[in-house]
Image (cartoon, rainbow, N blue to C red):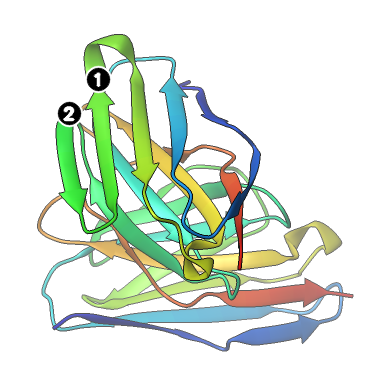
Amino acid sequence: GIQVEQSPPDLILQEGANSTLRCNFSDSVNNLQWFHQNPWGQLINLFYIPSGTKQNGRLSATTVATERYSLLYISSSQTTDSGVYFCAVAISGTYKYIFGTGTRLKVLA
Amino acid sequence: SQTIHQWPATLVQPVGSPLSLECTVEGTSNPNLYWYRQAAGRGLQLLFYSVGIGQISSEVPQNLSASRPQDRQFILSSKKLLLSDSGFYLCAWSSPGPRQYFGPGTRLTVT
């Protein structure tokens, strides 16, 4: 099956810093999502981005499907950005998502 | 707007007892519905998904089952819980496309 690897596994930032999170996947996909899980466990859908680039406020994401990776950029980080970031991919023609192991981000005030 | 509910929020059950977790979605019709489990400190594992009433696909052989008695209701069950069933159970929906939205989850501890 598809393997999904995220890096780095852990990241500590000072408030205001920028960061890049990476998601590598082992097979062709046409569905990719990024999620943020807050410290209370709630998962928030950040982006649906099977290819190309999207931006939403301080967050942006880029997926290069032909090279099997996606990047999530966080600019001017805030303490509320803390939590775990997951990417999830699904094989073409299905909505069965495989989640990566996540990047745990802590933003310090 | 669409809303997804899960209950209970937390549950402590003894080994061998039955389980029933409920998930309901409001504000949409004929959603795809999903059950995931998250072990402590790990990613999410897809357990079941459903594209319609009575249509359930199981992704991982295990001690659990799922049912969809109504269009916007998804139930996760077990006849006899095991210690390994402990975890954080999340329900999600998508409709009409592939973008998924998650409920608040149920933390299950089997003792």
Task: Inspect the image, locate mark 1, and give the three-letter code of the amino acid beneath it.
Answer: Val
Foreground: A46 or B61?
A46
**Chain identifier of the residue bearing label 1 in the image:** A
* Front-most of residues A31 and A76: A76
Q: Mark 1 and 2 residues: CB-CB less than 8 Å, in contact?
A: yes
Residue B43 % position (x, y): 59, 47
Sooner in the amino-acid sequence: mark 1 or mark 2: 2
Q: Residues within 10 Å of mark 2 (few under 14, many from 20)?
A: some
* Mark 1 → mark 2, Cα distance in angstroms: 6 Å
Looking at the rendering, in which quadrant would you find the C terminus of chain B?
bottom right
Residue A67 to residue A30: above or below: above
Residue at image point 11% right, 74% down: B29
Give the structural element (helix, strand or loop) at label 1: strand
- Location of residue B15 in the rendering, given as x and y in whole percent from the top left corner: 86, 73
Circle 1 crowding by C-alpha within 10 Å: few under 14, some 14–19, many from 20: some
Residue B48 vertical placement versus B88 (above, below): above
Q: Quadrant of the N terminus of chain B?
A: bottom left
Q: Is residue A9 above or below residue B73?
A: above
Along the viewing direction, whichever of A17 and B78 lies nearer the viewer:
A17
In this rendering, position of residue B28 left or right of residue A32: left
Q: Quadrant of residue B65?
A: bottom right
Q: Is residue A11 visible?
A: yes
Residue A97 in view of the camera: no
Circle number at residue A53: none
Q: Which residue is mark 1?
A: A64
Vertical placement of residue A16 versus B3, above or below: above
* Residue type highlighted by circle 2: Ser
Q: Which mark is residue A51?
A: 2
